[in-house]
Amino acid sequence: MNSSFDNIINSEKPVLVDFFASWCGPCKMLGPILKEVKDNLGDRISIIKIDVDKNQQVASQYQVRGVPTMILFQNGKQLWRQSGVLQKGDIIKVILEKSNQ
């Protein structure tokens, strides 16, 4: 998983990673919000979901202790991170401000 994860986040395009767990209520709320973000930004962003229970190595590498945690990467660098659920507009604003899109 790790090398493919590294390949994903080393993209020129910003990548928003949603660390989630299947048992987490707020994570379920965030799913549809992230779908709207993707619909809104289209090809300007990649959004991937990482199940922390199935990918504990990646979760611990990025010190994800609570879910949901979103981390924005571009060119392999972490630009921003936030735990908890944010609204669509706030997420889009952060992506546009932090990445050079």
Image (cartoon, rainbow, N blue to C red):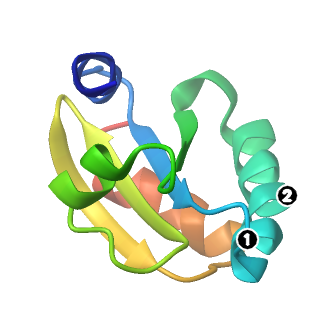
> Can residue 51 be seen?
yes
Q: Quadrant of the N terminus?
A: top left
101 vs 39, nearest the viewer: 39
Q: Which residue is mark 1?
A: 23
Residue 7 as seen in the image, left or right of residue 40: left
Q: Residue at x 21, y 67 (%)?
A: 63
In which quadrant of the rendered image does the C terminus lie? top left
Tell me the tag on residue 32.
2
SS for dot 2: helix
Dot 1 amino acid type: Trp
Residue 22: x, y in percent?
A: 72, 61
Residue 30: horizontal and vertical position, in percent?
73, 67
Left or right: 56 in relation to 10: right
Question: Picture quarter containing residue 33?
Answer: bottom right
Q: Amino acid at mark 2?
A: Pro
Q: Which mark is residue 58?
A: none
Return the disc, 2 or 1, that comes first in the chain's sequence. 1
Judge from the rendering whether residue 7 lies leftward or rightward of residue 36; answer left or right.
left
Q: CA distance from mark 2 to mark 1?
A: 16 Å
- Badge 1 marks a residue whose secondary structure is loop
Q: Tell me if residue 99 can be seen.
A: no
Q: Residue at x 52, y 65 (%)?
A: 93
Image location of residue 40, percent across then percent down: 76, 43
Q: Nearer the viewer, residue 74 or 31?
A: 31
Residue 65: quarter of image: bottom left
Query: In this picture, is 33 found above or below 36?
Result: below
